[in-house]
Image: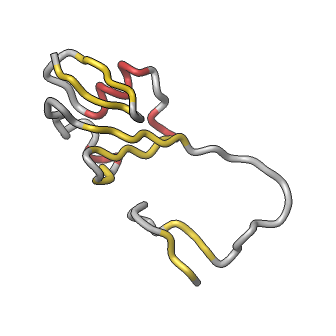
Amino acid sequence: MLRITVNGKAQEIAAPATIASLLQHLGVPADRVAVEMNRVIVRKPAWDSTPIPDGAEFEIVHFVGGGAGKPQNPTRRMDPSATHWLNS
């Protein structure tokens, strides 16, 4: 068993595990999330091949769409690498 932390909550999962298998285990739809493991964003193409070490800490963020009205700051957009905001 691997002891990990997901969004601040301690959990145990079966070893070996990858990020893709963790998301499946958690029932998280992989098409609308970003995953950070040990403070490093892991890009989606690497999820199937990235092993989870014992003691890993995860932040899993769900993207939420929708809303109405004008954007608060229309000159900011997410960098394609999903690591920081860009200003136009």
Indicate the quadrant where residue 70 lies.
Answer: bottom right
With respect to residue 26, does 83 lie above or below?
Answer: below
Q: Which image quarter is the N terminus in?
A: top left
| Percent x, y of residue 56 | 22, 36
Q: Which image quarter is the C terminus in?
A: bottom right
Q: Is residue 83 left or right of residue 64?
A: left
Q: Which residue is drawn at 41% across and 21% down?
A: 26
| Percent x, y of residue 28 | 46, 27
Name the image colouring: secondary structure
| Percent x, y of residue 14 | 20, 15
Figure disc tally = 0
With respect to residue 19, does 41 lie above or below?
Answer: below
Question: Considering depth in this image, is 71 or 49 the residue closer to the camera?
Answer: 71
User: Can you name the residue that lies furthest to the bottom here?
Assistant: 88
Question: Considering depth in this image, is 87 or 31 the residue closer to the camera?
Answer: 87
With respect to residue 82, does 43 lie above or below?
Answer: above
Q: Residue at x 19, y 39 (%)?
A: 49
Q: Which residue is drawn at 28% across and 53% down?
A: 40
Q: Which residue is drawn at 51% across and 76% down?
A: 86
